[in-house]
Amino acid sequence: MEPALEQVDTDDPPPKPTRKRQRPERQRPDVTYPRKRAIAACRLCRSRKVKCNNSRPICGACSSSNAQCIYEDSDDCSPFDSASIAILDRLNQVLYRLDQLPMQGVMGQTYVPNPLPMQTLVSGATELNLPDTQARMSQEHETPESLWIPSAKTAPESILAWPVLANIKPSKVPMVDALIDSCGQIQDNFNDLPTEHPDRSLFSETPSINEDDIPKLVQGFVDHVHIKNPVVDIDVLELYTQRVMEHGIRWDAASCLVLLTCALGSIAQEYKQFLAPDGSTSQNVQRHELSVGNAYYNAACRRLGLLGSGLLTPQCYFFAGVYLMYNLRPLQAWSQFRRASQAYHIYWEIRKFEKPKSAECTAKLQASRLGQRLYWSCYKTECEFRVELDLPNSTLADFCHADMHPSPPGLLNPQSDMIDNNGSPIENPSSSAVTSCRIRESRSNIELSWYYYLTEITLRRIANKVLNTFYDSSLSTWTAETMASRVIAAEEFESQLDKCMEQLPASLQFDVGQEPTEELPMMIWGRIYEIKCWLCRPFLYHAIHCPMDVRTWDLIQPLVDKAVKLCFQGIKRGVSRHRHHGTWFGIRMTTASALCILAARKSGQVEVPATWREDLQSLIEKMRYWEDEAPYVSQVIQTLEILAHNVDGDEDRDFAPV
C-alpha cells in the first residue's frame, strides 16, 4: 500500500524554534560576487593529465610545445564583475588591432622580422643594472622549426659545387678529406694499432703538471675564455681551485673542470691585432703553451668517463670541445659538444620533474641560471658546426627552452655559503688555500661579457632565420617571379643587423667602415659580416649563372655589388693569427669569400677589382701561419692556388701555384 500524502494545513501552529541560529539577511547584496569555481586547466593539459600553470592567454606547457592553448571557460565571464569585463573587452580590442598589422614578405607570405635585438631581459637583469638598449630582448616564442637549420649550405664546399667552377676545380676536392685527416688516420683493419697524425708529434714529450701554476692558469681562463662563454660560476670555480690546491687533483668532476680551465688558460692569450706574416707558424710561436695545455687536457680526459649526471658533466664536455677548437681539431671538438648537449638534455629532463623544498630554492635558481647559459652555448656552437659541415642537428633543437635568453648573474654575497653547480653546499677550504689562489673577475668584465653573450644569442637567431629563409632549398630553384620578395626579405634582415649595431652598448660599438681593435667588438663585427655575406651570396649566384632581363638585373644589382664588396673585405682582412674558439670558423668564412670572387671572375658576368690576384696571394700567405697545425689549411691553400691559376687560362694545362 502506498503511503498517504500529507495534507498541508495553513492553520497549523508555527513550528517550534530550533537551536540553530538563523543566518541574517545580507545587507549589501549589490556588492557581493558569485563564488568562483576552482581554476581549470587548459584543454591540452587536461587531456595529457599534466599540471597546468593557468597562464593566460597561453599556459607554460602549450608555450613550450608551440601548441594551441584553449580554456573551456575562455568565453565565460560570469566570475568577473562589470569593471573586469570592460577591461578584458578593451584588451581584446587592442590585441585584435595588433593582429591586423602584418608586413608583406617572403614569397607572398606574411613576414614579420624579429624585434631587435635587446628587449625585456628575463629576471635577474636588474642585478647588473643593464641599460635599456641592452636589457630589452626578443620575447617571441621559439619554435622547434626555427631551431633547426639547413646544413652546409653556405660552406666553401657548397661554393665549389657551383657550375661555373666545374671545369677548373680539381677532380677531387681535398678539403673535407683533410678534416678527417685532422682527427688521425682512420683504421679499417682492427689488427693495426691506431696512429696519430704526424703534426701531433709536438706533444710527444708532454711536460708534467705543476700544481703551483693552477691558480695562474685558471685566472687566464677567466680573463680570455670565460668572458666569451660565461657558462661556469666563477665563485664556484674559485672554490674548486682552492680545494685542488689544498687536497690535490682528485678523480672527480670538480678536478676535471679545473684541469680543463687550466688547459684553456695555457693556450688562450690576450687579443692582439693581426701582425704581418714573417714566416713563423702557430706551433713555433706557442710551442711551450700548446705542450702545457695538452698535459692538462690529457689529465682531464682521464676523468671525463667518471662524470655523473649533474650540471658539471655538460660543462666539462663543453670546455673539452672549446679546447679542441682552440687547437683547430673541429671534428673531435664537435664530438665533445655533442656529448655536452646530450648530457645537458638528460640533466634538464631530470630537473624539470623535481620539486625542490623552499630551503633549496636559492641553490636551484643558481643551477637554473647556469643551465640557461649552457643550453644557449651548446646550441649555438652546434649551429655553427652545422653551417659548415653536414652534421646532425643539435639534440637541443628538439625542445624549446622556456627562457628566450639566459639570466645574468647576481652579485653574490661573499659571506654567504657557496653552492656548487648541482645545488649542493661546498665546504670552504682552509684560509691558507683561499689566500693563495684568489680568482678575480671585475664588474666591468662581467658586464662586457654579458653584453657580448646576449648579443651573440640574438645574432644567432637572426642567422638561423636567414638560413631558413634563403637556404631551405637549392639556389637553382629560385625564379624571376620570387626574386622581388627575396630582395625585400634581404633588405629587412639587413635593416635588423644595422639596428642591432646601432643599439650596441658603448663598450661594444664600432664604426661600420672600420675594423674594431678590441676582441669582443671584433667577434660581433665578424658575426654580422658573416650574416651579411649569407644574405647577398644567393644574388651573386644568380648573377653568375642565370640569364635575366634588365628589370631583374636592376633589382638585384645592389645586392650583387654588395656581395663582391663584402668578399673583398674578407680577403683583405685575411686570417687572424689570434688563437680563439672561432679560429677554424674564421678560416672557413674567408675561404668562402675567396671562392666567390674566383667564381665571379670566371663567369665574366660580374666585375671584380683588378687587384684580386694580389689580394688572394696575400690571403694565402696569412693562412700559412696555421698550415703546420691544421692539415685542412694546406688543402685550402692548394685548392685556391689551382683555381686562381685556371680561372683566366686554359683549363687543360697543368696546374701551378699562383
Image (spheres, rainbow, N blue to C red):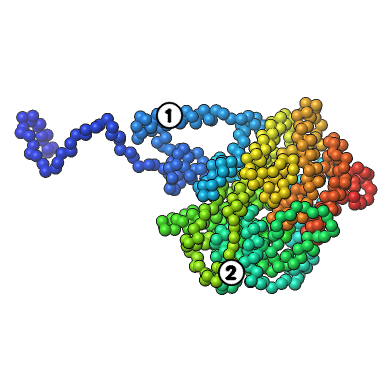
Q: Position of residue 390 (x, y in %)?
A: 71, 50
Q: Position of residue 477 (x, y in %)?
A: 74, 36
The residue carrying pointer 1 sits among few (fewer than 14), some (14 to 19) or many (20 or more) residues within 10 Å by Cα, namely: few
Tell me which residue sits at (43%, 48%) in the image: 51
Q: What kind of element bears circle 2?
A: helix
| Direction from residue 123 to residue 326 in the image, left or right | right
Q: What kind of element bears circle 1?
A: helix
**Direction top: furthest residue:** 551
Can I make out residue 332 in this image?
no
Can I make out residue 451 in this image?
yes
- Residue type beneath disc 1: Asp
Residue located beneath label 1 in the image: 89
| Direction from residue 550 to residue 322 in the image, left or right | left
Tell me which residue sits at (71%, 72%) in the image: 207
Tell me which residue sits at (50%, 65%) in the image: 426
- Residue type beneath disc 2: Ser
Tell me which residue sits at (72%, 65%) in the image: 289
The residue carrying pointer 2 sits among few (fewer than 14), some (14 to 19) or many (20 or more) residues within 10 Å by Cα, namely: few
User: Image height check: is 183 above or below 576?
Assistant: below
Number of the front mark, 1 or 2: 2
